[in-house]
Amino acid sequence: MISPGHLLLYAIVFAVICIIVFSIALFIITEPHPHIWRDEKEKYFFNPKTENSEVFPSLHDSWSVHLSVIVPAYNEEQRLPTMLDECLEYLENRLKNGCTYEVIVVSDGSTDKTVDIAHNYALKHENIRVLNLVRNRGKGGAVRLGILSARGSAILFADADGATKFSDLEKLDNSLTSILGFNYVNNPNEVSSSHAVVCGSRAHLEEEETAKRTFFRLLLMHGFHFLVWCWGVRGIRDTQCGFKLITRESARAIFQALHVERWAFDVEMLYIARKLNIPITEIPVNWTEIEGSKIVPLWSWLQMGTDLFFIWYKYKIRAWKIKRSKQM
């Protein structure tokens, strides 16, 4: 008769062996660096004015506008126009003061009229380009390919729902200036070659949101925050706000190393930034919940939780590795 003490010991030994075997297998089958796949069609954008396809530039080229705005969009025919109207009005006002810009709408395999709507805006505004992905890649994949096609000294990615108002970009700009000591309008060369990430944050609205949400949604929210704290990035209260500003050089370092292409990509992005000692700040922004979210509460949170675990675990066992440039 095996005693309970021996049974517990056997169970622990068995669990340790399983973890070791799992870790070895995961290390063997995992590519240490991401393979960034891009269809040949995705290397071009359609110019509705000339009715010709033109080649996207590369993130590795020198900057040619002060600010690039990347807008990932999946079936956003309802929400995109309002967001673009507000975005373009704000950026056109800044253009009068010398801040050149571009907007890249990345249709993430949309099956509705998202691409048509974006092209209609591009017909009226020469600063808009549309990257039409041939299949759905996930938000992280869409943001990455948009950033890899950007011309800006600084790059902002913003959600297509317009939940954060563009006037709050001024707050992110001020934070970027406080980190670097200069800004991308007056010193675009210096900003382009420097390192910084500025995150818009809704953390200051948490108390207000708590009063509105159901117990189940609150449980999911706090559970996700706990997992981010355990497995992801500590010190950033809101990793998921879709309003982040990044320098061109930091974008090169981070998005070439990024593996996760779904909702949890923000966490890996910030994890990589921390590992590369890139300065990160978190700035409160105004935020309004807009109907039409693509997040399915339970399923999306399960996906995020799984991604968070593997972000932490694969870097922990060195299955994933980060390439460092000579300057870092």
Image (spheres, grey):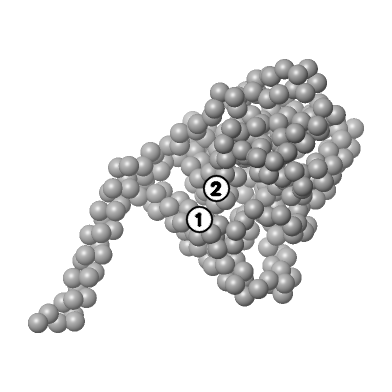
Residue 117, by quadrant, is top right
Residue 264 visible in the snapshot: yes
For the residues labelled 1 and 2, the Cα–Cα distance comes to 8 Å
In the rendering, at what x and y percent does residue 88 appear?
83, 38
Q: Residue drawn at (78%, 17%), measured in percent from left and top?
A: 50
Residue 273 visible in the snapshot: no
Q: Work out whether 62 lies above or below 13.
A: above
Residue 102, by quadrant, is top right
The image's mark for residue 303 is 1
Q: Amino acid at mark 2?
A: Arg
In screen coordinates, is 278 left or right of 73?
A: left
Mark before the other along the chain sequence, 1 or 2? 2
Q: Work out whether 277 lies above or below 60.
A: below
Q: Please give the residue where the numbered disc 2 appears in the rendered image.
A: 262
Q: Nearer the viewer, residue 216 or 268?
A: 216
Q: Secondary structure at mark 2?
A: loop
Q: Nearer the viewer, residue 20 or 177?
A: 20
Label 1 with label 2: CB-CB less than 8 Å: yes
Q: Amino acid at mark 1?
A: Gln
Task: Judge the density around disc 1: few (<14), some (14-19), many (≥20) Cα neighbours within 10 Å.
Answer: few
In screen coordinates, is 106 left or right of 38?
A: right
Q: Residue drawn at (50%, 45%), measured in percent from left and top?
A: 260
Q: Secondary structure at mark 1?
A: helix
Q: Work out whether 83 lies above or below 2.
A: above
In the rendering, at what x and y percent does residue 222 appear?
58, 68
Task: Judge the density around disc 2: few (<14), some (14-19), many (≥20) Cα neighbours within 10 Å.
Answer: some
In the rendering, at what x and y percent does residue 121 appear?
81, 33
